Amino acid sequence: MSRARTTSDRTATVPARGSWSAGIRAGEHLTITDLHGNQAVDFLVYDAHDTAVRYSAPDTVHARGSLFLTTGSVLLSNEHTPLMTVVEDTCGRHDTVGGACSKESNTLRYGHHTYAQHACVDNFLAEGAKHGLGARDLVSNINWYMNVPVEKDGTLGIVDGISAPGLRVVLRAETDVLVLVSNCPQINNPCNGFEPTAVRMTVGAPA
């Protein structure tokens, strides 16, 4: 059963291949809903008052003792300070090692004919520019709903997702943060089921 939301909530539907950004105040919740299932949502988060303090995958993985994120995971900064915490997760596992697709990585992995395809790095640069951020501010990101199994020998792959329509992940801001989102446009691997779809972003007070 979906939780009731207050009238002060801010909701946006991010179209397939689209981008989104927002400032989220300490204590507010951000809900990311996979509307159609099997859609990767690339995600970066910064301290809203000092964007040099930003999400750190190494700090987060080390503190959690796991490569995967789920309920209870604290998203730590490069200063080892908490930015956001996963307070609810109906999917169960999310990636933070697979990175964001780019024109360069698409070309390397899938061939030169893919260079013109829109990519997550393009989305991050477009959204970041609205907040004074550039290429030097892009770091290793989270991929909500993306299924990246890691084998014992360290090899990893991108395989069919484990999400489904209507599943959500809810994050609580531990400080004022700036969030950048790329609704992944990738069509060359199964992270989006080869057909990117829309997702919903909801910012509001705890239900």
Image: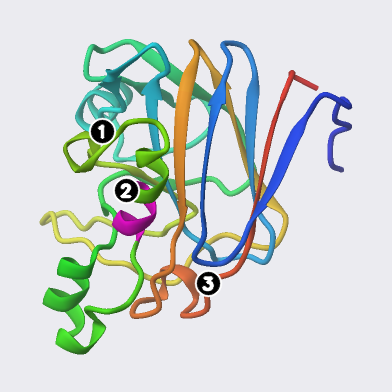
Q: Which residue type carries mark 2?
A: Leu
Q: Is residue 121 magenta?
A: yes
Mark 3 to mark 2: distance in Å? 19 Å
User: From which residue to which does the magenta span run?
Assistant: 120-124
Q: CA distance from mark 1 to mark 2?
A: 19 Å
Q: Earlier in the sequence, mark 1 or mark 3?
A: 1
Label count reads: 3
Q: How is the image coloured?
A: rainbow
Q: Point out the image quarter for the C terminus.
A: top right
* In front: label 3 or label 2: 2
Residue 116 in picture, x, y percent from top left: 27, 79
Residue 100 on the magenta span? no
Q: Give the residue type at disc 1.
A: Ala
Give SS at disc 2.
helix
Relative to residue 195, is residue 162 depicted above or below? Answer: above
User: Which amino acid type is marked by label 3?
Assistant: Pro
Q: Which residue is mark 2?
A: 125
Would you call the spot at circle 3 few (<14 residues within 10 Å), some (14-19), or many (20 or more)? many
- Identify the residue at horizontal 47%, vertical 20% (top origin): 177
Q: Taken as a whole, is the magenta stretch helix, strand or loop?
A: helix
Disc 1/disc 3 C-alpha distance (Å) = 25 Å
Judging by the rendered image, the residue that carries numbered circle 1 is 57
Quadrant position of the N terminus in the picture: top right
Depth check, mark 1 against mark 2: the one in front is 2
Judging by the rendered image, the residue that carries numbered circle 3 is: 196
Q: Secondary structure at mark 3?
A: loop
Residue 100 in the image, given as x and y percentages of width and height: 29, 55
Other-residue count near label 2 (Cα within 10 Å), few / some / many at <14 / 14–19 / ≥20: many
Q: x, y (%) of residue 66?
A: 31, 35
Q: Residue at (58%, 49%) from the top-left corner? A: 91
